Image (tube, rainbow, N blue to C red):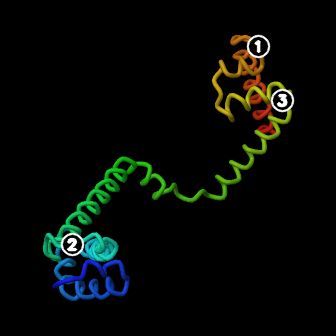
Amino acid sequence: MEIDTKRLKDERYRDEVLTALLRNYQERIVRYCVTRLGEDIGEEVAQEVFVTAWETLPQFRQDAAFSTWLFGIAKNKCAQAFRNRSRRQTIAQAFLVDIRHHAHAEEPETPEHVMVERAQLARFATGLAALRDEERIMLNLRYTKGLAIAEIVEIVGKSEAAVRKQLLRALQRLRKIMDEGSEA
């Protein structure tokens, strides 16, 4: 098949050339890609081969046959698809535990369990409300914000020992208030 390289910038002419390439090579390119990647991915990659061919046709140098050029594109596209699939599989293997955990969530909670959790949350909210502001802030910084003791020391301007002691006392008060609420 002969082409006029000067006319390759014209989209209509490129469409004609691509139609001829599809007619002559599509079946072989699809078979090549499917053999290497499987039916689903292979057919998709074969389409990408012809899209790339259409896009790069103006740069085609007639040093080689069209079949050599197309199969070169197909080889590169298949290798790229294989690398991408390998990367996805590696990532999936690396996060398999997380994926399984999220895919197989725990069994639905029973109504009794939900009621117990709600009661605990209510006692917790009541307990927090009963604490002094300073105690509530310290617990929030440590357990909600996840700050280290050294960071809390900088924020509140107290010694490390004082912060540890205040956190311990705040937790003890919170437990006591929550325990009293569960006995009621």
Whichever of callouts 1 and 2 sits on the residue coming sooner in the sequence is: 2
Q: Residue shown at 72%/43% (left/top)?
A: 120
- In front: label 2 or label 3: 2
Q: Marks 2 and 3, Cα distance to the nearest angstrom?
A: 68 Å
Q: Marks 1 and 2, Cα distance to the nearest angstrom?
A: 69 Å
Q: Which residue is mark 1?
A: 158
In the displayed structure image, the side of residue 153 where residue 47 appears, left or right: left
Are discs 3 and 1 less than 8 Å apart at CB? no
In the displayed structure image, the side of residue 14 where residue 172 appears, left or right: right
What amino acid is at disc 1?
Lys
Are discs 2 and 3 less than 8 Å apart at CB? no
| Residue 131, disc | 3
Whether residue 40 is visible to the viewer of this picture, yes or no, is: no
Q: Which residue is mark 2?
A: 33
Q: Quadrant of the N terminus?
A: bottom left
Instruction: Note whether 65 is above or below 103 in the view shown.
Output: below
| Residue 40, disc | none
Q: Quick one: SS at disc 3?
A: loop
Are discs 1 and 2 less than 8 Å apart at CB? no
Q: Position of residue 139 (x, y in %)?
A: 73, 29
Q: Residues within 10 Å of mark 3 (few under 14, many from 20)?
A: some
Q: Nearer the viewer, residue 178 or 148?
A: 148
Q: Quick one: SS at disc 1?
A: loop
- In front: label 1 or label 2: 2
Q: Position of residue 60 (x, y in %)?
A: 24, 71
Query: Residue 2 appears in which quarter of the rendering?
Result: bottom left
Q: Residue shown at 36%/82% (left/top)?
A: 10
Whichever of callouts 3 and 1 sits on the residue coming sooner in the sequence is: 3
Instruction: Note whether 184 is above or below 154 in the view shown.
Output: below
